[in-house]
Image: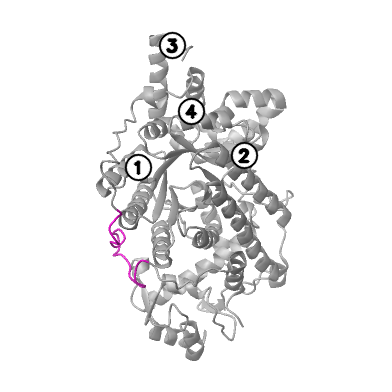
């Protein structure tokens, strides 16, 4: 019997999208198996290409405390609106119950008056407009001050696949009858994933059928077109929960996580517990003996696993080699069984991956292929947003497959890494190393993360380990560690690009400092910055006017349909908004300056 159908479906889908794709074992800039020491940056590569210092003078210093420069693009009315909205966002009860309050206001005021009120306040602060034409004036104005755009059509729908709360079940799931032992983190749970019942953390889409996914793809295509016509070197944001059935992403994530945990278990048995992920290397002889002793496969059968082009000449297997086995052409004689650490029993990696799910795998990669080709045609880069941890392994794997095809000459596809996750550094370093070996450009957006409260509540209720770093300080450490690793990669190979998506002024200053130390000039456009529309203009606009690539994450859509986005943003950022004293102080400082200068009303 073949290796798990999930792997074979992935391989077939990739070939379908790109028949001329090179073998996975294609050599890259570094020898196979080499990995940086734990806690350090990537190993040195070739020296950076010469850059004429005369052509690239040092960028000017950036002052994040100059209110006049920070808000030069804003009218006085916009300043006053910002003061009101950010002030309301600092009131905990309002933020905590914002969804209920929005619905109450809508019923009391009526739709027309409610929409007018929203455009004067929260919608006007955080959303660019209702459609592609309406957002153009804002985009042009920001561009004049050196600020680009990441366009995001922010109409949000629910994760639950039926409004009545009952989720559809695939044929394979019905056949299993719930007998399969599933990882708790990857179990569907009705209490999470929509905007009702006080849970507002899920920016996912209402799945009805594959035709709905095709409609979402068409929406993203229009967003790419709008980005091309409105912003130079712009981005367009996409979400894979819009392009695939969410339950399929959960099941595929479970396969990937089980496979990785099995590798870690084997590494621990070879005395490598606690090592950095990329330093772990399994000795093939010992691994074959272990697999045979566990009754998984015979030594002769496992020998076929390691005879591929990329593994046949090595006596060790690291995590990237191990992951490649999921895509191997080799066959084994029976379903792959994985030992369960809790029960000690062997269980299938995945008991059944249905033909329906095979087809879903192909379709989501085909949709990503269509979007990537349109982005290349239009000169736009695609930003694949991160989502909840139970979707993320599948999302990252599918994104990397797309990067392999389209990031050969430059970073077109950007993957997002959430640094509040405990495993963020391992994920970043693993994908950077893969890009080195295969010779493609690594593109990433680094964020702290948007689903912390929902993730922790879900972990507590379902009884699995909290995937989030224990403190905000630990998340900051993780963010800077991942960022520094990518900056070192840019210095040594110039084949990586990063968006520092952060509202944290200290993180932005850290990035600017490291760019100076490493000789990364903003004109190279390898490092860019990003903030949400309506937040932290005192960071965004000084960066843009100093010549650094910087972008606003620009949502748009009809008022009524963007309400879930506004509700979610309020919940996600309530901690930050409550601490946004500096932004409010600078807004008030600029209002007073204009008032005293006599130009409050004729700015």
State the residue in front, 337 or 185: 337
Instruction: Look at discs 4 and 3 and give the one toward the viewer.
Output: 3
Q: Earlier in the sequence, mark 1 or mark 2?
A: 1
| Placement of the N terminus among the 4 image quadrants | bottom right
CB within 8 Å, label 1 to label 4 = no
| CA gap, disc 1 and disc 2 | 36 Å
Which of the 4 image quadrants contains residue 126? top right
- Crowding around mark 4 (Cα neighbors within 10 Å: few <14, some 14 to 19, many 20+) is many
Give coordinates of residue 491: x percent, y percent. 31, 53
| CA gap, disc 4 and disc 3 | 23 Å
CB within 8 Å, label 3 to label 2 = no
Q: Which residues are magenta?
A: 29-49
Residue position marked by numbered label 4 in the rendering: 86
Dominant secondary structure (helix, strand or loop) of the stretch shown in magenta: loop
Residue position marked by numbered label 1 in the rendering: 522
Give coordinates of residue 280: x percent, y percent. 36, 72
Q: Which mark is residue 564?
A: 2
| CA gap, disc 1 and disc 3 | 34 Å
Residue 371 visible at all: yes
| Residue shown at 60% from the left, 51% from the top | 192
Instruction: Look at discs 1 and 4 and give the one toward the viewer.
Output: 1
Q: Is residue 194 left or right of residue 384?
A: right
CB within 8 Å, label 4 to label 3 = no
- Crowding around mark 1 (Cα neighbors within 10 Å: few <14, some 14 to 19, many 20+) is some
Q: Earlier in the sequence, mark 4 or mark 2?
A: 4
Residue 122 visible at all: no
């Amino acid at each position: 019997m073949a290796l798990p159908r999930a792997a074979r479906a992935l391989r077939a889908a990739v070939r379908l999208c790109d028949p001329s794709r090179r073998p996975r074992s294609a050599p890259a800039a570094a020898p196979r198996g080499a990995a940086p020491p734990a806690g350090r940056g990537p190993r040195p590569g070739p020296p950076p290409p010469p850059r004429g210092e005369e052509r690239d003078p040092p960028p000017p210093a950036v002052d994040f405390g100059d209110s006049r420069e920070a808000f030069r693009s804003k009218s006085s009315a916009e300043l006053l609106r910002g003061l009101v909205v950010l002030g309301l966002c600092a009131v905990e009860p309002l933020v905590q119950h914002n969804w209920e309050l929005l619905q109450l206001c809508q019923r009391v005021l009526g739709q027309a008056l409610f929409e007018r009120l929203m455009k004067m306040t929260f919608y006007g602060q955080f959303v660019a407009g209702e459609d592609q034409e309406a957002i153009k004036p804002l985009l042009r104005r920001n561009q004049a001050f050196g600020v680009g755009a990441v366009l995001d059509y922010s109409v949000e729908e629910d994760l639950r696949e039926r409004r009545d709360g009952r989720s559809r079940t695939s044929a394979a799931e019905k056949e299993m009858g719930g007998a399969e032992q599933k990882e708790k983190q990857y179990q569907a749970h009705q209490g999470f994933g929509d905007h009702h019942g006080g849970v507002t953390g899920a920016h996912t889409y209402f799945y009805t059928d594959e035709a709905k996914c095709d409609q979402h793809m068409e929406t993203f295509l229009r967003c790419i077109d709008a980005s091309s016509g409105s912003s130079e070197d712009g981005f367009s944001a996409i979400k894979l929960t819009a392009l695939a059935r969410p339950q399929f992403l959960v099941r595929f994530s479970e396969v990937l996580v089980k496979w990785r945990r099995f590798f870690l278990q084997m590494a621990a048995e070879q005395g490598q517990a606690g090592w950095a992920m990329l330093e772990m290397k399994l000795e093939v002889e010992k691994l074959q003996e272990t697999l045979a002793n566990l009754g998984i496969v015979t030594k002769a059968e496992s020998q076929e696993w390691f005879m591929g082009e990329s593994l046949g000449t090595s006596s060790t297997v690291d995590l990237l080699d191990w992951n490649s086995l999921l895509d191997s052409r080799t066959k084994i004689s029976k379903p792959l069984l994985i030992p369960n650490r809790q029960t000690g029993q062997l269980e299938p990696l995945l008991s059944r991956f249905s033909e329906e799910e095979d087809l879903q795998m192909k379709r989501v990669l085909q949709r990503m292929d269509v979007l990537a080709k349109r982005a290349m045609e239009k000169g736009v880069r695609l930003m694949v947003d991160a989502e909840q941890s139970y979707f993320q392994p599948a999302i990252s794997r599918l994104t990397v497959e797309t990067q392999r095809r389209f990031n050969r000459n430059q970073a077109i596809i950007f993957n997002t890494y959430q640094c509040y996750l405990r495993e963020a550094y391992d994920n970043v370093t693993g994908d950077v190393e893969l890009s080195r070996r295969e010779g493609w450009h690594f593109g990433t957006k680094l964020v702290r993360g948007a689903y912390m409260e929902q993730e922790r509540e879900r972990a507590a209720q379902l009884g699995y380990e909290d995937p989030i770093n224990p403190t905000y300080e630990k998340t900051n450490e993780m963010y800077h560690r991942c960022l520094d690793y990518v900056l070192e990669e840019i210095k040594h190979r110039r084949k990586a690009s990063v968006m520092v998506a952060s509202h944290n002024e200290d993180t932005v200053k850290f990035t600017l400092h490291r760019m100076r130390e490493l000789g990364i000039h903003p004109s190279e456009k390898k490092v860019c910055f990003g903030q949400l529309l309506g937040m932290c203009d005192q960071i965004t606009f000084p960066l843009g006017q100093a010549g650094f690539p910087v972008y606003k994450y620009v949502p748009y859509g009809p008022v009524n349909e963007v309400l879930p986005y506004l509700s979610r943003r309020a919940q996600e950022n309530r901690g930050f908004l409550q601490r946004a004293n500096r932004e409010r102080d600078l807004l008030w400082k600029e209002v007073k300056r204009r008032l005293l200068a006599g130009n409050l009303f004729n700015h």
